[in-house]
Amino acid sequence: MKILAIIPARGGSKGLPGKNLRLLAGKPLIAWSIEQAKACPEVDCTFLSTDAEDIAAEGKARGAEVPFLRPAELALDSSPTEPVLVHVVKRLAEQGRHFDAVLLLQPTSPVRRPNSLSAAIAQFAASGADSLLGVVEDHHFFWRDLADPKALYDYQNRPRRQDIAAQDRRYRETGSLYITRTETLLLTANRLGGKIEMFLQSEEEGWEIDSQADFDICEQLLKGTR
C-alpha cells in the first residue's frame, strides 16, 4: 500500500499568529509532524501543503516535498481541509504519482508516540477499512445550553468509569491522524467515508493546539523527545 502523508499548514492563523513556525520544544511546530512522517517506514511521500513561502522553505529544510504552493482560495480562514487533500492528490496524479491512501497529519496535534503512525497504518491495512481516525477514550460528563442546562448523560444515575460497558464507552477524535483510501477521498470529498475504523491513541496524543494553554501543555509533553 502506497501511503501519501499530507501536512496542511497555511500561513494565516488568528488564534496563535504564526503558530506553524513558532518554536515548540525547540522546533518549529510543523517540524514535528514532518519528522514523524519521515520516520515512518510505511509512508512513501511526506507532502507539505501551504500557501506561505516561509512555511514552504522550512518544510523543504525538514525533508518534506513542497513542489507547489496551495491556491489562495484553499487558504482562507473558512477553507476546509478536504479540498486541500484533493488538490494535492490530483496535482500529483497529473505528474503520474498515484497513492493508495492519504495519511492526514494536522500540525496542531504534534504529540504522537514513535510507533503510532506505523500501528495506525497496520490496523488500517488489516481491517480493510476505507478510512480511519485517531481517537482517545473520553470519560467526561458533558452538558449543554447555559441558559437552560441539559445533561448529556443520566446525572441521576451517574456511572462509574469502571462500570461503563465496552460498547458504551465514548471516544473523541484527536485530530492527530486520519487515513483515507484515495478512491474514497475522491468519491466523497471527505476524510471519513465507507467502512470507518477507530485507532485508539494514548491520552497525551489527544492534545490539539488551539490556544496558548494548549501550546504550553504540548511543549511540556514534547520536552525530552528532541
Image: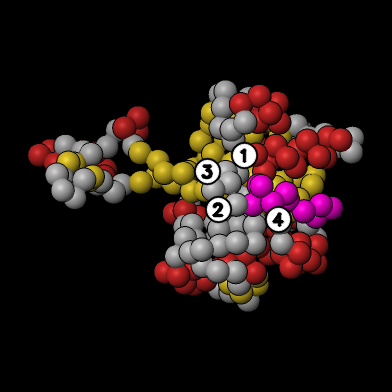
x and y percent of residue 105 in the render?
Answer: 63, 50
Asked whether disc 2 touches disc 4, contact meaning CB atoms under 8 Å apart, the reply is no
The alpha-carbon separation of the residues under discs 2 and 3 comes to 24 Å
Label 2 secondary element: loop
Quadrant showing the C terminus:
bottom right
Q: Residues within 10 Å of mark 4 (few under 14, many from 20)?
A: many
Reading the image, the residue beneath label 4 is: 50
Q: Residues within 10 Å of mark 3 (few under 14, many from 20)?
A: many
The earlier-in-sequence mark between 3 and 4 is 4
Left or right? Give the position of 130 relative to 70: left
The alpha-carbon separation of the residues under discs 2 and 4 comes to 13 Å
The span picked out in magenta is 65-75
The alpha-carbon separation of the residues under discs 2 and 1 comes to 14 Å
The alpha-carbon separation of the residues under discs 1 and 4 comes to 14 Å
Amino acid type of the residue that numbered disc 4 sits on in the rendered structure: Thr
- What residue lies at 62% left-to-right and 65% top-to-bottom? 20
